[in-house]
Image (cartoon, rainbow, N blue to C red):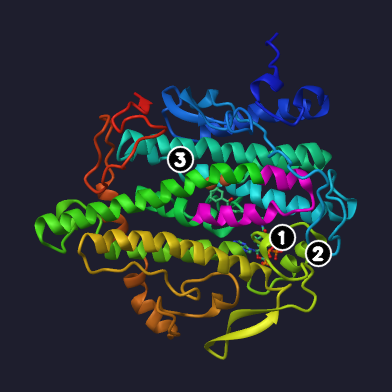
Amino acid sequence: MEAQIDYSQLIPNNVGLSSDRKLQRALESWHPKFMNWWQTNGPDSYQENEVYLRTAVSVDKKGWAHFGPVKMPDYRWGIFLAESHEQDKRIKFGEHQGEKVWQEVPAEYRAPLRRLIVTQGDTEPASVEQQRILAATAPSLVDMRNLFQVNVEEARHLWAMVYLLMAHFGRDGREEAEELLQRSSGDPDKPRILGAFNEQTPDWLSFYMFTYFTDRDGKYQLASLTESAFDPLARTCQFMLTEEAHHMHVGETGVARIIQKACDIMNQYKTDDVRRHGGIDLPTLQKYVNFHFSVSEDLFGAEISTNAANYYTQGLKGRYQENRIKDDHRLKDEPYEVSTFRDQKIAKEEVSALTSINERLRDDYIEDCQRGVNRWNKLIKDAGIEFEIKLPHRAFHRQIGTFSSACVAPDGSVISSDQWEEKKLEWLPSQQDHEYVKSLMVQVTEPGKFASWIAAPRIGINSQAIDYEYVRL
Ligand code: BYC
Ligand code: FE
Ligand code: FE
């Protein structure tokens, strides 16, 4: 007989796993399926190598970031809810405003809550699948390590959602937990739920763009779920946000290092022909920005959404930093300005703040995206180079919402579909761009060395040297 696994030991947690037999049993049957998914859909190879990883073993300052060499299959996927600091926590918005937050799912909200949790949970393994093959072309050991760090944490986010499903949704929850392992990114028959999570992440430029733009959707969605009246969801998402910061940092610094390298080449060789010297030119980088930003914008849903209005009114999903917004937090008569597409024109319209919750979150998101773009532009300016990276207009290349029927240039001008067809490869990565970027992707494994197209980071991980052996090969 196989030795019994002690799940309360195997899975660091602050949810009282050792005293919850039912939950333990559910996890016992899910865990081997998860491991099987991880082996077949997670990082290709390197499962037996030690990686210098951060593991959360508790939620306090001392425990949430333990660094050390770990083989990925031995990573301890913990289940953590952020500590509740409020003694008497109350619902902040919607029709239940002022009532006590819920520790159990109210029967009338089972379906929408389950749907939100499943949608959130679905993105986590999807991103791991999208990034599966990247290690084979890692530009350095520290980059490879960052990839694996992001991967294990996204898998932990899957655990976080699976925990909620199993602890609070009974049999339905267990079925959803299985299906989260059965859908697969890009699979024509069983795709992941949201568009961006079925796109490919074929190269490291895409990876950094993804972690900058798409993980940032994660930040905003998680932040609005931390406002939820369903307290276990709120606290789970709160803890996930601490990890999310690192993912976006990997993206921002990754893109910054590519920009730095492009600028160095331009200055060193006094040329705009960055490609000739093995770098990624800024116009190509701009095209990747255009793609990843627009695809990530779609993740916020339609501008006008009764789903979003209902989630808000029911107290299931709030706005970004609900506390800091000065209004009645019910939004029955509040206006909000959104851009819409009507009669082939983009116009601003005042609509109900309640139905435009998605758009408001997208507005917060766009502002946040712009801040990092400004930092990238400062690098370019400091290098004495005239080029500005611009976020495309919000109506550019959209598949969801009011602009999905519009053809719009990055500067926001409405164009005909013929013009769009003619120009789109000037704005979005073409086959040739993809092939060029792909041609640069060669694995570099000597500690402290980097591929031709990316500068070294300024600092290592957890104050280790840059040439530390972050992955032991
Ligand atoms: N692709 O009423 P609407 C992360 C569907 S990322 C495909 O506007 P709603 C991470 C929509 O489902 C964060 N379908 O939708 C990042 C609806 O379907 P039905 C993930 C889409 O519900 C990197 C219909 O269109 N978390 O954590 O207001 C790495 C009508 O739309 C899309 C969440 O998303 C799309 N892009 O808003 C790892 C939070 N957009 O009802 C991880 C949970 C919309 O017609 N999810 N649709 O069948 C939600 O809050 C909402 O589901 C959404 C959509 C904001 C996504
Ligand atoms: Fe995540
Ligand atoms: Fe993330």
Q: In this view, does 379 lie above or below 305?
A: above
User: Observer-nearest residue: 110 or 186?
Assistant: 110
Percent position of residue 116, x then y = 71, 54
Give the mark nearest the N terminus, 1 or 2.
2
Question: 138 left or right of 23?
Answer: left
Q: Which amino acid does label 3 sit on?
A: Arg
Q: What residue type is labelled 2?
A: Gly
The residue to which callout 1 is attached is 318
Q: In this view, does 49 lie to the left or right of 153?
A: left
Is mark 1 in CB contact (under 8 Å) with mark 2?
Answer: yes
User: Marks 1 and 3: CB-CB under 8 Å?
Assistant: no
- Label 3 C-beta lies within 8 Å of the nearest ligand 1 atom: no
**Near-viewer residue (395 or 93):** 93
Mark nearer the N terminus (1 vs 3): 3
Counting from the top left corner in percent of width and height, residue 358 is at 65, 67
Earlier-in-chain disc, 3 versus 2: 2
Q: How far apart are marks 1 and 2 (CA)?
A: 8 Å
Residue drawn at x 35%, y 71% as measured from the top left: 427
Residue 94, label in figure: 2
Q: Which amino acid does label 1 sit on?
A: Gly
The magenta stretch is: 214-237
**CA distance for labels 3 and 2:** 41 Å
- Quadrant the N terminus occupies: top right
- Ligand 1 found in image quarter: bottom right
Identify the residue at image location x=74%, y=78%: 334
| Badge 2 density bin: few <14, some 14–19, many ≥20, Cα 10 Å | many
Regarding residue 203, the answer to whether it shows in the image is no
Q: Where residue 256 sits in the image (x, y, percent)?
A: 33, 53
State the mark number for residue 132.
Answer: 3
Secondary element under disc 2, as helix, strand or loop, is: loop
